[in-house]
Amino acid sequence: MRIIGLLAVLLTGCTSQAVKLDAVPPSHSAQVLNSAPHRLQALVPQAPVGEVLRVYLEGDGHAWATASSPSLDPTPHSPLVVQLALQDAQPAAYVARPCQFVDEPSCHPRLWTRERFAEPAVASLLSALDQLKARTGAQQLELIGYSGGAAMALLAAGQRDDVLAVQTLAGNLDPDAWTTLLRLSPLEGLTPLDYRQRLALIPQRHLIGLQDRVLPPELAHGYAAKLAGRCVQVIEVDATHHQGWPQAWAAWQSQPVLCPEAASMAWADTHGE
């Protein structure tokens, strides 16, 4: 069985420098949230948010330095998710993953490799979301996850009662199926399908790239079939794992997530449709 690093090289992109957050526009403030057990870097909107806060969740970042060696710094090398959050027409926050942008004694490669979806990582995200609500005055959340951030969005939604919808881009929706399909080492921790009954009731849209070789489209379709929820959309777009997402997201980010009966009515009410 191959180790996860053989594929993880593809997840980190081809650039050689980590993203820096030293030029954040006035629309946002860069804040490190004290979200135990891991502090998380966030970009918090300065404008009034209203009832619903949209939160973009970073992917796995620069998890691997080579095919067999974990990175010493998981900070992403692509600014994609940061840019999507900053360019959103509505006030939106951004949340990184453990040890991205933040260096602390607890940082260890296992946190961004085999334990990337483990309970401590999810607990930190749940705490960060609570803090973002408190700081912005929002009452409900819409979570947007890219790549491994998609799994985190679903894991958070499965444990909260304030998530109106989840949207993902090139998302890892079923980590167990992913490692099995690509013959990778299993990951430790949670999987979204642990919360399938709750997730089946949450409106979801998953955009998947037809040319994505890191997370092949069949994985998202398999997740939707296992969830068997009426509120789950899987949309195929012209994209790879790393390219094509600004264009694909521009076409869908303002479209309501389709879901029958009460769920779709709740979406329309909170988004002013």
Image (tube, rainbow, N blue to C red):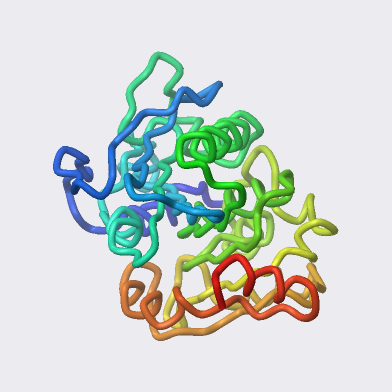
Residue 114 visible (yes or no): no
Residue appearing at x 51%, y 80% in the figure? 255
> Which residue appears farthest toward the left when viewing the image?
23
Can you give x and y, in whole percent of width and height, for residue 62 in the image? 34, 45
Above/below status of 234 relative to 227: below
* Closest to the observer, 81 or 220: 81
Left or right of 265, for residue 60: left
Residue appearing at x 37%, y 18% in the figure? 104
- Total marks placed: 0
Above/below status of 246 relative to 2: below
Residue 265 visible (yes or no): yes
Left or right of 86, for residue 238: right
Can you give x and y, in whole percent of width and height, for residue 37 in the image? 55, 21
Can you give x and y, in whole percent of width and height, for residue 12 in the image? 33, 53
Residue appearing at x 37%, y 28% in the figure? 32
Snapshot quadrant of residue 227: bottom right
Which of the image's four quarters has the C terminus?
bottom right
> Which residue appears farthest toward the right when viewing the image?
197
Above/below status of 17 relative to 251: above
Residue appearing at x 35%, y 47% in the figure? 45
Above/below status of 83 relative to 155: below
Can you give x and y, in whole percent of width and height, for residue 24 in the image? 20, 44
